[in-house]
Image: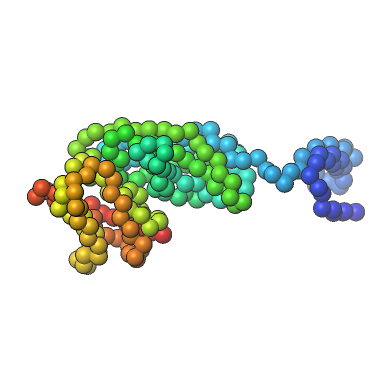
Amino acid sequence: NHKSFIPKDGEYTINATAYGDRNAIDPGITKQVTLILTANPLPVEIVKFDVRTKGSELTFIWQTASEINNSHFEIFQGNSIEDFEKIAMVPKSNANTSLKSYSYTTNTIACGRQFFQLRNIDYDGHIDYSKIVTTNINSRDCDLSYYPNPVDQNKLFVNHKQLDAGSEIKITSIDGRVVKTVILSQATEGPIEIDVSDLKEGVYLLSVSSNLNLKTERLIISR
């Protein structure tokens, strides 16, 4: 007979006896299994988190040793460990393995020294944090950087080696319409925050003009 019950938190021992000829063990043999039930499952264990650079690309690589109750992962970036902004969201893997590997690549380079952290988000709101990793890139690829790309929230950050007063940042739709313009009132070297909540999902062109120099990059908005 099969019996069922709703157990409370605690440790339980189950005795299972094999019957018939459809078992991997001999009939009549009893196996004992111990179960520990808890309303607070073990968190995700992030065993590795690293970032690699190649040209104008950043690739984030991480591994988890256990995944219980997790919803997704989020990658955060900042000029310091005190001003993190989310730049990407990555769904959990459905692979049937205990050790799961992930990677995420963005074609937007982060100029200067940047800090990154991976966060696992559980369905109940619990958050697990990875170690903080850094990059320090100074090259011609750093003339213009922007993140996140794709934009999955309502904020776009544009970073330029040097933006003078009067410099313009434009976002243009693929049919040539200028949908957003930002004109700087003073020179700046830090990232500029742009609200893109009013823009629809799609492909755009991001243009930055400063001192008669113009640079244009492809921008994707996908929420």
Q: Position of residue 53 (x, y in %)?
A: 32, 35
Q: Could you tell me which residue is drawn at 33 percent across and 58 percent down?
A: 195
Can residue 207 be seen at all in this image of the molecule?
no
Check the image and report above or below for 31 versus 108.
above
Color style of the picture: rainbow
**The one of 174 and 86 positioned closer to us in this rendering:** 86
**The one of 66 and 190 positioned closer to us in this rendering:** 190
Q: Could you tell me which residue is drawn at 21 percent across and 35 percent down?
A: 139
Q: Could you tell me which residue is drawn at 40 percent across and 56 percent down?
A: 153
Based on the displayed image, in which of its 4 quarters is residue 177 positioned?
bottom left
* Image quadrant in which the C terminus is located: bottom left
Which residue, as the protein is rendered here, is positioned at the far front?
186
Counting the numbered discs, the total is 0
Q: Where is residue 222 in the image (x, y as percent from the top left)?
A: 38, 59
Q: Is residue 199 left or right of residue 66?
A: left
* Image quadrant in which the N terminus is located: bottom right
**The one of 179 and 49 positioned closer to us in this rendering:** 179
Q: Position of residue 27 (x, y in %)?
A: 87, 41
Can residue 184 be seen at all in this image of the molecule?
yes
Q: Could you tell me which residue is drawn at 72 percent across and 46 percent down?
A: 39
